Amino acid sequence: MKSDNVKKGIAHAPHRALLYAAGVSKKSMDRPFIGIASSFSDLVPGHASMRDLERQIEKGIHSGGGQSFIFGVPAICDGIAMGHSGMRYSLPSRDLIADCVEAVAGAHQLDGLVLLTNCDKITPGMLIASLRLNIPTIVVTAGPSLDGYCKGETLTFIRGSSEAVGRYRIGEITEEKLHEMEMCACPTAGSCQGLYTANTMACLTEVIGMSLPGCASASAVSSKKKHIAFESGLAICEMVQKNIVPTDIITRDSIRNAITVDLALGGSTNSILHLLAIANTAGVDVSLKDFEELSFKIPQIIKLDPSSHLTMTDFDRAGAVSGTIKNLWGNTPELKNTKNVVGITVEEIAKNAWVDESVIRPLNNPITTNPGLAVLHGNLAPNGAVIKLSGVSPDCLYFEGKAKVYDSEEEAMKAIEDDVVVAGDVVVIRYEGPKGGPGMREMLAPTSLLAGKGLGEKCALITDGRFSGGTRGLCVGHITPEASQNGLIGLVRDGDDIKIDIKARSIELLVDESELNNRKANFTLKPLKVQKGFLVKYAKTVSGADKGAVTL
């Protein structure tokens, strides 16, 4: 065992002495050492219930013959970090999390890992770490919150808070009603209830095969989740015996399976960033071209909040990831018969799944023939841009409007709140990319405010930043190259015409080439918005969004 490097032989008496001090018994020295990387935090509602899951995983590991060790991993709640400078830390924390898990597991020579995770950057960060270490690893995502409810209205985090702010701004609801809704929007611990980034990545982790069937959608406060945590603890012990490692599971085929299901579900645009980063770490040849190719083949067969009133609770009851695979398998040649960490194949999952086809549609009766996500190109985004097509009204697939340009999210928010932005505008938010942000902040606040003020289908918003999985409306993100890498978005001026044609997968700045050349000649790149600390180091090493915003 790898842990023999710290527990076997005369020379390792000092190591054993320290392990005894930590509570390891002499008999347990012969067991595999299994780390539980837990992102428990009182600060993050998606992670606040993890103490119970830690205990269940421990029980499973000890029942399976292992010795468990819990260690902590940072976690950031994107909802709390949203709309201010704190969001700059969110995406960079993905790499920080990967570094933390790698450092602890590598330094202590652990034989295997259970990754207890849930929210947006934590899950992909842990998956990246698993690939760097390449020791037996299984993922337990802590699961979604139960739905909110307020005086006859079912709520989610987005509907009950972010969009409610916009409704209050236009006088649709009172301040008292707003406060009632915010109190009821998130009634339990767990990730936000819709198909935002946390739940999207949980689903894709299950599709890839790194977590047990049912893990992605089982509620954070359910006994089912506790059972899955226990079974995952048992499973990791067998995986260590068989030496089943992440590179056996995370392959080109399994990542393309994840892309296929992502398109069918209409998941968060952030999933593109994370799948590209995971593929990069795995050394797997997957790029934006794979998303483009598959997007013309995979229709959307379910629509969840924020694009509908269905939530993860409804998805779980309807068959969840297994039910989705069932409706895709056999009719989608792009879906390959890969195995998960306990050896169950995609074909077996499809065969044994139950599905409610009124919620998860069959392929011959999709929600729409369009995919849930799309990649756009054009002079504004020669390296690509992404849009959550599942959140766009069918009447808004073509949009042409005048630019209103802002060099930060805060400037754009003020303009929207002050009614400077009107129907027909294209809101341009730049210098918010991975390098220019730095940290590529999510633009949930402005998109939710537009939706709440009734402008969600009357305006477009484009940015070199990114969006929350809770975003809906005509919102194009990940524009590359970003402004801070001399992208054309840095040359856009107020009043410029911009055309977005989703059917043609194009986004164009309608300005004469001679005028653009003149602007380039007089262009001065803005300095970084921060000058010291973690974010400066991140900005110096991060790649573009089209490469997954990786730092290696």
Image (spheres, helix red, strand yellow):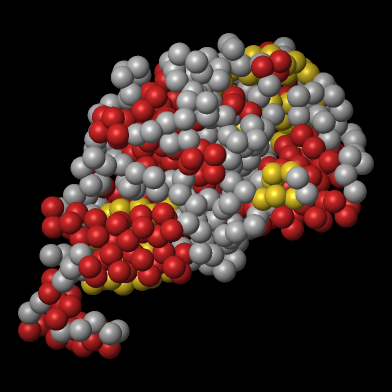
Measured from the top left, where is residue 102 in percent x and y?
33, 60
Measured from the top left, where is residue 515 in percent x and y?
74, 16
Task: Please name whichever residue, 212 or 529, is drawn nearer the observer in this view of the structure.
Answer: 212
Measured from the top left, where is residue 147 in percent x and y?
62, 48
Measured from the top left, where is residue 321 in percent x and y?
41, 37
Task: Please name whichever residue, 223 or 512, is drawn nearer the observer in this view of the structure.
Answer: 223
Horizontal side of 164 relative to 488 (left or right) equals right
Horizontal side of 372 relative to 451 (left or right) equals left
Horizontal side of 382 relative to 364 (left or right) equals right
Q: Quadrant of residue 473?
A: top right
Residue found at x 88% / y 55%: 176
Residue found at x 72% / y 55%: 184
Which quarter shows the N terminus?
bottom left
Residue found at x 31% / y 72%: 69
Task: Please name whichever residue, 243 or 226, is drawn nearer the observer in this view of the structure.
Answer: 226
Can I make out residue 319 in this image?
A: yes
Task: Please name whichever residue, 141 or 399, is drawn nearer the observer in this view of the structure.
Answer: 141
Residue 286, placed above or below residue 154: above
Residue found at x 63% / y 22%: 380
Residue 398, placed above or below residue 471: above
Can I make out residue 492 in this image?
A: no
Q: Quadrant of residue 393?
A: top right
Residue 327, placed above or below residue 236: above
